[in-house]
Amino acid sequence: MKKEEGTYSFLEPGDMPRANASLVFSGLSLAILLILILVAFILEGKGGLVLGAVGLVGALFALYAFIIGMIALARRESRYRLCVTATITSGLMMIIWLTVFLNGIR
């Protein structure tokens, strides 16, 4: 526990890297999804292999963010709201990416 100017904190200054990384990766996954939707709309659905490869990277970002978020929740090393937000966001992104993938191979 640190005491700074009359306040107590149970978290050290560097205690939230996993939660922050999880939130960043889930945000990147969402950004990739939105950009790919826009590009596919502009190209009228003829994006091909390049858009699929970038989409795979976005799905892997979501998976990695989910794993990091679950580790941060298990170790209780950061604020719960940030960890829960990041984990739920990345879980939803994984479901969306799986839906896009399954519609693509249909």
Image (spheres, rainbow, N blue to C red):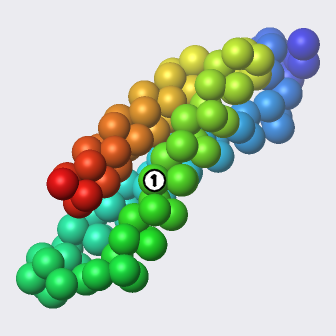
84 left or right, relative to 48: right
Point out the residue furthest to the right here: 2
Up-down: is 91 above or below 59?
A: above
| Residue 97 place in picture, x, y as percent | 34, 49
Q: Could you tell me if residue 28 is visible in this image?
A: yes
The quadrant holding residue 93 is: top left
Q: Nearer the viewer, residue 18 or 64?
A: 64
Q: Residue at x 54, y 53 (%)?
A: 61
Up-down: is 5 above or below 40?
A: above
| Residue 5 place in picture, x, y as percent | 83, 22
Q: Residue at x 37, y 54 (%)?
A: 30
Residue type at tag 1: Ala
Looking at the rendered structure, the number of numbered marks drawn on it comes to 1
Up-down: is 3 above or below 101?
A: above
Q: Quadrant of the C terminus?
A: bottom left
| Residue 80 place in picture, x, y as percent | 58, 18
Q: Could you tell me if residue 79 is visible in this image?
A: no
Mark 1 neighbour class, 10 Å CA radius: few under 14, some 14 to 19, many 20 or more: many
Q: Nearer the viewer, residue 85 or 11?
A: 85
Q: Quadrant of the N terminus?
A: top right
Q: Nearer the viewer, residue 33 or 13?
A: 33
Q: Residue at x 39, y 82 (%)?
A: 50
The quadrant holding residue 42 is: bottom left
| Residue 60 place in picture, x, y as percent | 53, 53
66 left or right, relative to 75: left
Up-down: is 97 above or below 76?
A: below
Residue to which mark 1 is pinned: 59
Element type at mark 1: helix
Q: Residue at x 34, y 45 (%)?
A: 98
